[in-house]
Amino acid sequence: MKKLFLAFVFLIGLSATAQTSKELIGKWQLVKWTKKGKEKSIQDYFKTDQVFQVFKENGDFDSLVGDESHKAKWKLSKDNSELTIISVLLPIKFTIDYFDSQKRVITSSQVGTFEYKKVAD
C-alpha cells in the first residue's frame, strides 16, 4: 500500500510559472527524487528507472512503474500552483515548483521533491 501511494506521488508533476494543463498533457519521466535535502535512488526504490506519469486531456492519468500501470484522475488548480492526483484511495496534492514544456518540479511535504522530463509517447 505504501509503494502504491508513493508511486502515485512520484508520478505527479507540474509547476507554477504560468503554464497550463495544455503543457502538462503527455508522458513525463521521473529523473530525480529528493527528500529532506538528500537525493533518493529511483532505481533502488522502484527496482527500475522507468517511472513515468502520463497526463491525458480528459483528466485521465496513468502512473507507470516498469511494467505496472495505475490509473487515476488529475486536475490543476485555477492558478496553476497545485496539481492534484485523485486515485481510488485518496487525492494527493503537489505544489508546483517549476514547470515548462520539457521539465517539471513538484513537491509534496510527505514524500519530497520530484523532477520530471517530458519524453516522446
Image (tube, grey):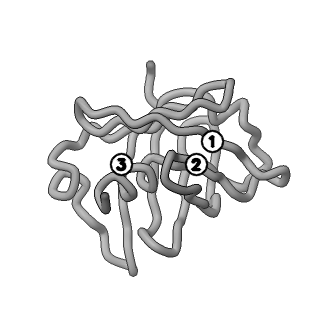
- Residue farthest to the right, as pictured: 78
Task: Check contact, mark 2 vs mark 1: CB within 8 A.
Answer: yes
The three-letter code of the residue at mark 3 reads: Val
**Is the residue marked by circle 1 packed among few (<14), some (14-19), or many (20+) residues within 10 Å?**
many
* C-alpha distance separating marks 3 and 1: 21 Å
Label 1 residue SS: strand
Look at 59% across and 60% down and name the residue there: 94
User: Can you say whether 113 is above or below 57 in the image?
Assistant: below
Q: Which residue is mark 2?
A: 85
The three-letter code of the residue at mark 1 reads: Trp
The three-letter code of the residue at mark 2 reads: Ile
Q: Image check: 10 left or right of 105?
A: left
Q: Which residue is mark 3?
A: 31
Label 3 residue SS: strand
Q: Position of residue 25 (x, y in %)?
A: 62, 29
Between discs 2 and 1, the one toward the N terminus: 1
Q: Position of residue 14 (x, y in %)?
A: 61, 49
Q: Position of residue 69 (x, y in %)?
A: 34, 32
Q: Quadrant of residue 5?
A: bottom left
Q: Which residue is mark 1?
A: 74
Query: 1 or 40: which is nearer to us?
Result: 1
* C-alpha distance separating marks 2 and 1: 4 Å
**Is the residue marked by circle 3 packed among few (<14), some (14-19), or many (20+) residues within 10 Å?**
some
| Mark 3 vs mark 1: in front | 1
* Quadrant where the image shows the C terminus: top left
User: Can you say whether 51 is above or below 119 in the image?
Assistant: below
Task: Check contact, mark 3 vs mark 2: CB within 8 A.
Answer: no
